[in-house]
Amino acid sequence: MAEQLLHGTDVVTLWLGLAATVVAVAVALLLPKRFPSILWPVIYSSLIQVYASACFNAAFEKHSEGKTTGSWWAVVGVGLAACVIVVVVTIVVVLALRVFGVEV
């Protein structure tokens, strides 16, 4: 199944996304305390949007020609499910750290 999902460009995009995440976190950690907190997320989000539009806009337009869109409730459901997963994982990690005596 993994062979069907991951083709050459898919793997490259996956690794580029991982590398971009590592760079974004590293830059965020290196920024001075007085740096405006909203500015860095705006910068990297804008860069990601420009990159995604350049790489995938033509394929998206071709894919969406003449098709109806899906339900927004599905989008909301997936977003809420992802949010719940992140919250649960965060709580588990914080509790595990407290059990091991790490102050959070």
Image (cartoon, grey):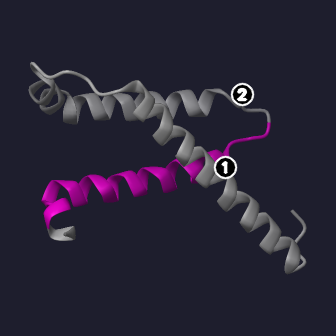
Say whether disc 1 or disc 2 marks the residue closer to the N-terminus.
1
Q: Is residue 71 above or below residue 85?
A: above
Q: Which residues are magenta?
A: 4-33
Q: Is residue 63 left or right of residue 80?
A: left
Q: Position of residue 57 (x, y in %)?
A: 20, 27
The prevailing secondary structure element of the residues shown in magenta is helix
56 relative to 75 in the view: left or right: left
Residue pictured at 41% horizontal, 56% vertical:
19
Tell me if mark 2 has few (under 14), some (14-19) or many (20+) residues whose alpha carbon lies within 10 angstroms of its own.
few
Q: Residue at x 9, y 27 (%)?
A: 62
Q: Are marks 1 and 2 in contact (CB under 8 Å)?
A: no
- Residue 95 colored magenta? no
Q: Separation of disc 1 and disc 2 at Cα?
A: 13 Å
Please, what is the three-letter code of the amino acid marked with disc 2?
Pro
Q: Identify the residue at horizontal 14%, vertical 64% (top origin).
A: 4
Give me the disc on residue 36: 2
Residue of label 1:
30
Q: Nearer the viewer, residue 17 or 6?
A: 6
Question: Residue 57: which disc?
Answer: none
Residue occupying the point 37% across, 51% down: 17
* Residue 103, placed above or below residue 38: below
